[in-house]
Image: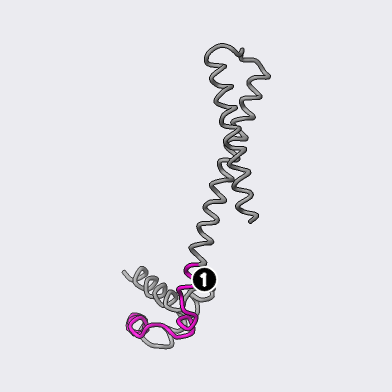
Amino acid sequence: MGQKLIIFIATAILLITGVLLGYVLSQLVLGFLTLNLLTFLGTFSLIVIFGTLYYVLFWEFRRQQSQTVLAGRARTTPARREERGPDASLKNRLISLSGDAATAEQLVDQVKQDYPGMPENWYWEKAIADLERDRP
């Protein structure tokens, strides 16, 4: 409810500010207003308010979309999938690149320390990519 209220209020203020800015600029262009310090500061403040609200409004939309996407991924990703180990093909490929299983495990452990919180397969893929990149 709070985010929808913020979006509603920001949209209303954005519309009002846009109309005022358009009116002031049209009056300046038509010559009905003279350009002095007061009209310059007023126009500048309307531009700043309009730009700030525009940024805040679309930042809020992006934040809502990212939360929706993350919530959707959390629902579709089974919890048990993270508990199992890496794919056998990834494990075998890293072992063949590194020479032995102990070295492969050490490489994956190092990647886990550098990038905590990633899925298990990602660590193995990253270790493979790092080894392939460093090879001549």
Residue located beneath label 1 in the image: 115
Residue at 45 percent across and 84 percent down: it is 105
Quarter holding the N terminus is: bottom right
Dominant SS type (magenta): helix
Closer to us: 118 or 79: 79
1 left or right of 64 in image: right
The outermost residue toward the bottom is 101
Q: Position of residue 4 (x, y in %)?
A: 60, 52
Residue at 53 percent across and 19 percent down: it is 26
Residue at 64 percent across and 29 percent down: it is 45
Closer to us: 41 or 103: 41
Q: Which residues are magenta?
A: 72-97
The outermost residue toward the right is 38
Q: Amino acid at mark 1?
A: Tyr
Closer to us: 136 or 113: 113
Q: Is residue 95 magenta?
A: yes
- How many marks the image carries: the answer is 1
Secondary structure at badge 1 equals loop
Q: Position of residue 6 (x, y in %)?
A: 63, 48
Give neighbour class at mark 1: few <14, some 14-19, many 20+ (Cα, 10 Å): few
